[in-house]
Image: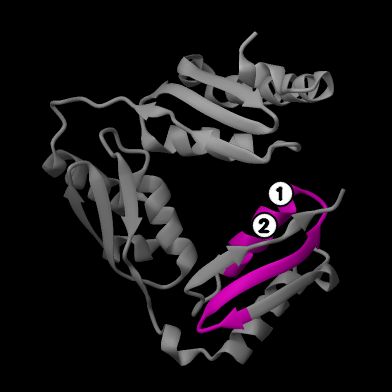
Amino acid sequence: MNKKDMNISPVNAVKDDLVTEQIKSILDARMEASAMDINVTTRNGVVELSGLVDVLAEKKYAGAVARSIDGVRKVENNITISMDSNITDKHIEKEVINRLNQTGDDSNLTSVGVKVNDGVVNLIGHVDTLKTAHTAMNLASQIRGVKDVVNNTNILNAEEYDDVSLHNRVRDQISASNLSSKDIDIEVKNNRVTLKGYVNNRRESELAKELTMGIEGVKKVHNRLRVRK
């Protein structure tokens, strides 16, 4: 037994094992063969992910799964993305643009520009909402050879919305959903929204964030919602 393991109490060791098993189980079920090369270890609530995946989206997904598990205090995502030396920046740029243009759910994606440098995708141009920008980032991360995605898009007409009107629009959107709006506090400053308070589970937290990102004029969302114990 090494010194690090000696600092873990038997109770924490059991909790860590449960966390590891939960993460592995979800990854195996949802990522199937892609999860075979992902290693998961947990020590005192800190999860370390390592191994190899084909695309950035898989690395991000594994990290999101780990963060969603109760008892996880921190996630160290050290998963490596498999790189093919035959894939050039020009190839990646073409593939990302094709992916954005082929997505019929959001016609605004076609206005997003793409530049690639050493495998890092830079998204530029204008989008109607923050949600559209995040959709573009998610699509770009699914392309082989992409190491990272940087969002430098601008939100259209953001200056037309003041903080008070944005606060009201976020409140109305959340109230119209199944979320308990009375337990969610909304702060808006310079078109940047902070969500605080409590929700019943992580899915509700993600829903509140997603609804807020879809509102025109919102430039950024800080999600500080907590899950009730």
Q: Residue at the location (38% across, 55% down)?
A: 136
The residue tagged 2 is 207
Residue 51, how many percent across, how many down?
43, 20
Q: Is residue 4 left or right of residue 107?
A: right
Q: What amino acid is found at the position of numbered circle 2 in the picture?
A: Leu
- Label pair 1/2, CB-CB below 8 angstroms: yes
Q: Which residues are magenta?
A: 188-212
Q: Residue at the location (50% across, 84% down)?
A: 190
Q: Which mark is residue 77?
A: none
Q: Is residue 170 left or right of residue 159?
A: right
Q: What amino acid is found at the position of numbered circle 1 in the picture?
A: Arg
Residue 97, how many percent across, how many down?
24, 51
Mark 1, residues whose alpha carbon is within 10 Å: few (<14), some, or many (≥20)?
few
Residue 80 in view: yes
Q: Nearer the viewer, residue 104 or 114?
A: 114
Residue 105 in view: no
Name of the residue lying farthest toward the top:
1
Q: Nearer the viewer, residue 18 or 186?
A: 18
Residue 133 sits above or below residue 80 on the image? below
Residue 4, how many percent across, how many down?
63, 21
Residue 209 sits above or below residue 201 on the image? below
Q: Nearer the viewer, residue 184 or 47?
A: 47
**Could you tell me which quadrant the N terminus lies in?**
top right
Whether residue 189 is in magenta: the answer is yes
Element carrying mark 2 = helix
Whether residue 63 is in magenta: the answer is no
Residue 64 sits above or below residue 37 on the image? below
Element carrying mark 1 = helix
Quadrant location of residue 147? top left
Name of the residue lying farthest toward the front:
3
Q: Residue at the location (80% across, 57% down)?
A: 199
